[in-house]
Every structure is written in structure tokens, then in C-alpha cells.
Image (spheres, rainbow, N blue to C red):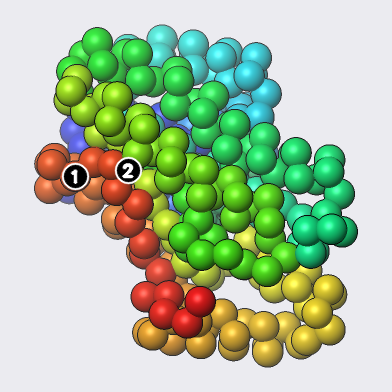
Amino acid sequence: MSRFAGQRAIVTAAGGGIARTIAEQLHREGAAVFAGDVDTKGLSSLPDGIAHQRCDVSNRVEVDAFFDAALAHLGGVDILINAAGIKGPTGVIEDTDPEAWAACVAVNLTGAYHCLRRVLGPMKAKGSGSIINFSSTGGLYGYPERSPYCAAKWAIIGLTKTAAAEAGPFGVRVNALCPGSVEGDRMDRVIADEALTTGKSVDQIRDDYVKDTSMRCFVTAEDISEMALFLCSKAGARISGQAISVDGHTSML
Ligand SMILES: NC(=O)c1ccc[n+]([C@@H]2O[C@H](COP(=O)([O-])OP(=O)(O)OC[C@H]3O[C@@H](n4cnc5c(N)ncnc54)[C@H](O)[C@@H]3O)[C@@H](O)[C@H]2O)c1
């Protein structure tokens, strides 16, 4: 399939997790992909043909070097998958370490801004482009003991709507994805940390997450990737400024 033939995509956090699945699918479907991550081992194991460079999105100098290299390598950009995010600390607000708060916001919110600002100019000048920012169901509800993560992910939606309003007149679309609980390492770590602070068992906590959804499920990285590619494809040509959940319908929060 070559739905993205001729398209140039930059994908952050593509060394592992959801963004890796998206980078691989974009590559399979014909896009030229440039990937970044702090995990250089993860980047090195990407399929041949996906170019990559280390990029910590919270470090503006590193982000600028990464985007300089990506834009030069690809000769421009049509798609940004702005995916880097960390789960941040687990604990009630009064016990949250201010440094852990700052680190969480630096990656999830300021990091997304660092990357966004580097593609908006080229995309507006070209008159087209699609950007996917990563929020979360945590950006639509409050989750106890995840205050910096939820605050940053709510802010991502405000950033997305503002960027969409600014860039829309230039033919550039900006949307946010709100994944629910995604099968994989990340949710395993979230659940393990919650088990420590609440005293509940891992199985109980997992069951609580499942019960939050009307479809009684976790979602997969492939579910998120399919929606990201739909939004970036011609099928999404009139969709912008939206925060779209792929979460099995969170109905109990
Ligand atoms: N997994 C979930 O259940 C879930 C749910 C909702 C939203 N999200 C969001 O989706 C996005 C991807 O999540 P995931 O589950 O794939 O994450 P993950 O924890 O599996 O990490 C994916 C990659 O991000 C990289 N990374 C971490 N810090 C980075 C930084 N500072 N700069 C660049 N790369 C960095 C890691 O090295 C890793 O390879 C994140 O924004 C996350 O908040 C995830």
C-alpha cells in the first residue's frame, strides 16, 4: 500500500511504544520517515530506510539540531507525529516532588511545543501539512495521583486548538489524539506504580482501568496508529482542531 508515497514524516519518540508503530506503518505505506528518541538503541533497531537521530524533546538545543537534520534529510515535512511523553510521578499533589512535576511538564507539554514550532513555519510556507499531538484520556478527565501528566495533557489540547486556528488558513491541520490505556510496557509501569501507592494488586488495578471503558478493554498501539494515519491521509483532509479519543469509550470517569 502506498497511501503516503511522496510524503515526508517526522516522528518523535519512535524508538519504542506507540510512535514506533506509527513510524513503521508510515514507512510501510510509502512515507519517508525521520525518527527521534532518547533511546538510541531503540532507534537503531528501526527497519532499514527509517532515518533517525537522538532527540530529547525537552532539550531545545537537541530538538533544533534534530529538526535541522530531519528537514535537510527529507527536503521538507508533510507530517509531524509529536508523540514524546512520559508518565511522570505517581502520588497525590501535596506529595509530588516539584522537580518530578517540572520534568513531566517539560517533556509532555514544553517538548511538544519545541517540536511544533519547528514544523509550523515550513508547513505554512508550503500551504499544507498534518500534525498529530499526543494528549490522553488523562487530558479529558482527571486521574488521581497523576497531576502533572493530566495537567500537561489537558494543555496539549489547548495548544492543539490554538495551533489549528493559527495554521488552518495556511492549509495546515493540527489534531490531538487521546489514547486510553494502551497494552504494553508503559501501562505496565503505570499500574505497578499505582499498586505501590494504593496497596491494591496489579490485577485489581488493571481491572479498574478496563471497567472505566464501556467496551471493557485496553487499546493497542495499532489502534492508535490507524487513527493517526487516517487523520494524516486524504480521508482526514477536513479534520482539524480536534481531540480524538481512541480508548474503548471511557465512560466511568
Ligand atoms: N501508553 C498509554 O497507555 C498511553 C495512554 C495515553 C497517552 N499516551 C501518550 O502516547 C505517547 C506515546 O506513549 P507510549 O506509551 O508509546 O510511551 P512509552 O513510555 O512506551 O515511550 C515511548 C518512547 O518515548 C521515548 N521518550 C521518553 N522520553 C523522551 C524524550 N524526552 N524525548 C524523546 N523521546 C522520549 C522513550 O524512550 C520510548 O522509546 C505519549 O505522549 C503518551 O503520553 C500513552
Q: Is residue 91 left or right of residue 106?
A: right
Residue 104 shows in this picture: yes
Count the labels in the image: 2
In the image, the residue with mark 2 has its CB under 8 Å from the nearest atom of ligand 1:
no
Residue 173 percent coordinates (x, y):
25, 34
User: Residue visible at 80% across and 79% down?
Assistant: 198
Residue 164 percent coordinates (x, y):
29, 33
**Measured Cα–Cα span from mark 2 to mark 1:** 8 Å
Q: Is residue 138 left or right of residue 221?
A: right
Residue underneath mark 2 = 175
Residue 20 shows in this picture: no
Q: Which of marks 2 and 1 is nearer the N terminus?
A: 2
Residue underneath mark 1 = 239
- Eyeballing the image, is 57 above or below 219? above
Give the amino acid at mark 1: Ile
Closer to us: 225 or 3: 225
Which picture quadrant has residue 104? top right
User: Residue visible at 43% across and 52% down?
Assistant: 21
User: Residue visible at 21% across and 28% down?
Assistant: 168
Closer to us: 237 or 109: 109
- Eyeballing the image, is 174 above or below 211? above
Q: Do the residues labelled 2 and 1 touch (CB within 8 Å)?
A: yes
In the image, the residue with mark 1 has its CB under 8 Å from the nearest atom of ligand 1:
no
Q: Is residue 221 left or right of residue 171?
A: right
Give the amino acid at mark 2: Asn
Residue 94 percent coordinates (x, y):
84, 58
Element carrying mark 2:
strand
